[in-house]
Image (cartoon, rainbow, N blue to C red):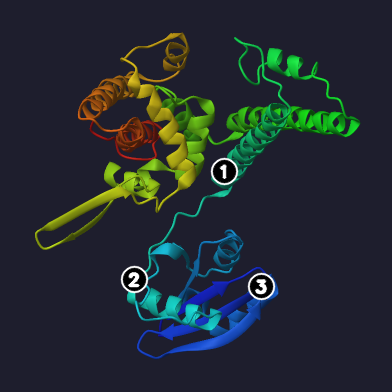
């Protein structure tokens, strides 16, 4: 029987550095190949058989194309978290060749942490929600440019007028400047603000349409998450797109760690030191859950919008959501009473909110036949 071969790939846009570690042999470099489907096919044929290979590469800007190519060839492939690859303290030389050798060696030793690879439905939804997030960031920058331009020339919006409403934009269109060049600049800034607003509307319309086309279990989880206060459609879609199947993680504690919202710690002997959150996790998830956590500063209640969303979910999901309102509001009040800053309190509440998100996701997936039920 042929031995298992562990292959480390250091992937770039145009090249791939390759290293191989046999089960009981040395780790050696095989050089660099072009990042093309035909070159990958030849590499697998050279190192095969495919079922005896164990390939790993780091998650990065090249996406999961290489993973799908290797999987189609019958090669088990693991995508690993780059920030969790072991690093020697005294190692000060970094090259593609050395990185590939390290990946092969660590993969053979079992020291690498795999990341979740989304399926086609989750990846498409993730691309869409991230495109909407990019459009929102561009809209914010366009508004800041226009706002600072007006302030620089002494134009303040009238008292009682809220920024970036239709009334505010109508007022901006009445502003006139003395120089033609400044008028042209104002028109350009205003056009950019309106263009960014249209982009956001188009992305949100596309998300509405995409939700109707996703698999039924995924759509059920999106609906279930909206039973939580502070989480509406866009937030629920973002959470599902970033987390995937929630039941793939066995405990809520591990789900909190995935977001990077847990405090860093340096404990040795009798000395215990804890600091701010690690942020070594999914930043998109952390942002959405952090925004939702601000709703916990209000007393538990079910308003008209939330009542409408509750009508589409089961009694068990509503019970978890109601329990979440009481628990998170009490946590918010308790930490605020201890003198913690509001941002620190909301971060702690967001960490607990992830546990309720996990509970609802697993409950809905169990109802859809995807996971065992969770005790609440």
Determine the secondary structure under disc 1. Answer: helix
Where is residue 166? Give x, y as percent. Answer: 70, 15
- Which residue is drawn at the image coordinates 53% and 83% (left, top)? 97
The residue wearing badge 2 is 111
The residue wearing badge 3 is 35
Residue 118: tell me if it is visible.
yes
Of 206 and 325, the residue lying toward us: 325
Q: In which quadrant of the rendered view does residue 12 lie?
A: bottom right
Determine the secondary structure under disc 3. Answer: loop
User: Which badge, 2 or 3, is on the more N-terminal residue?
Assistant: 3
- Which residue is drawn at the image coordinates 45% and 41% (left, top)? 285
> Marks 1/3: CA distance?
24 Å
Packing grade of label 2 (10 A; few <14, some 14-19, many >=20) is few
What's the mark number on residue 126?
1
User: Which badge, 1 or 3, is on the more N-terminal residue?
Assistant: 3
Is 43 placed above or below 371 here? Answer: below
> Marks 2/3: CA distance?
26 Å
What's the mark number on residue 31?
none
Where is residue 184? Give x, y as percent. Answer: 87, 32
Labels 2 & 3 near each other (Cβ < 8 A)? no
Q: In which quadrant of the rendered view does residue 173 lie?
A: top right
Q: Left or right: 335 with respect to 281?
A: left
């Amino acid at each position: 029987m042929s031995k298992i071969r562990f292959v480390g790939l250091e992937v770039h846009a145009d090249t791939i550095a390759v290293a191989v570690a046999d089960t009981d042999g040395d780790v050696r470099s095989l050089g660099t190949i072009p990042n093309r489907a035909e070159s990958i096919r030849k590499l697998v044929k050279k190192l095969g058989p495919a079922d005896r290979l164990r390939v790993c590469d780091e998650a990065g800007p090249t996406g999961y194309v290489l993973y799908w190519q290797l999987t189609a060839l019958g090669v088990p492939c693991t995508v690993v978290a780059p920030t969790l690859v072991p690093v020697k303290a005294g190692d000060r030389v970094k090259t593609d060749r050395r990185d590939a050798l390290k990946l092969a060696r660590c993969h053979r030793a079992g020291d690498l942490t795999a990341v979740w690879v989304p399926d086609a439905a989750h990846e498409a939804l993730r691309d869409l929600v991230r495109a909407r997030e990019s459009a929102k960031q561009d809209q914010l920058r366009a508004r800041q440019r226009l706002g600072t331009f007006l302030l620089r020339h002494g134009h303040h919006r009238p008292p009682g007028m809220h920024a970036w409403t239709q009334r505010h934009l109508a007022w901006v269109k009445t502003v006139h400047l003395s120089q033609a060049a400044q008028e042209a600049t104002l028109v350009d800034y205003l056009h950019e603000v309106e263009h960014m607003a249209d982009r956001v509307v188009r992305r949100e319309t596309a998300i509405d349409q995409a939700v109707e086309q996703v698999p039924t279990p995924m759509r059920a989880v999106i609906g279930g998450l909206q039973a939580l206060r502070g989480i509406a459609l866009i937030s629920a879609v973002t959470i599902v797109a970033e987390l995937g199947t929630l039941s793939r993680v066995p405990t809520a504690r591990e789900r909190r760690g995935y977001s990077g919202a847990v405090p860093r710690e340096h404990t040795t002997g009798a000395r215990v030191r804890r600091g701010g959150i690690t942020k070594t996790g999914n930043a998109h998830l952390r942002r959405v859950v952090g925004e939702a956590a601000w709703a916990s500063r209000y007393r538990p209640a079910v308003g008209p919008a939330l009542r409408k969303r509750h009508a589409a979910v089961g009694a068990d999901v509503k019970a978890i959501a109601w329990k979440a309102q009481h628990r998170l509001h009490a946590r918010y009040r308790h930490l605020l009473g201890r003198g913690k800053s509001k941002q620190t309190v909301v971060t702690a509440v967001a960490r607990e909110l992830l546990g309720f998100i996990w509970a609802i996701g697993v409950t809905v997936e169990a109802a859809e036949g995807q996971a065992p039920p969770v005790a609440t």
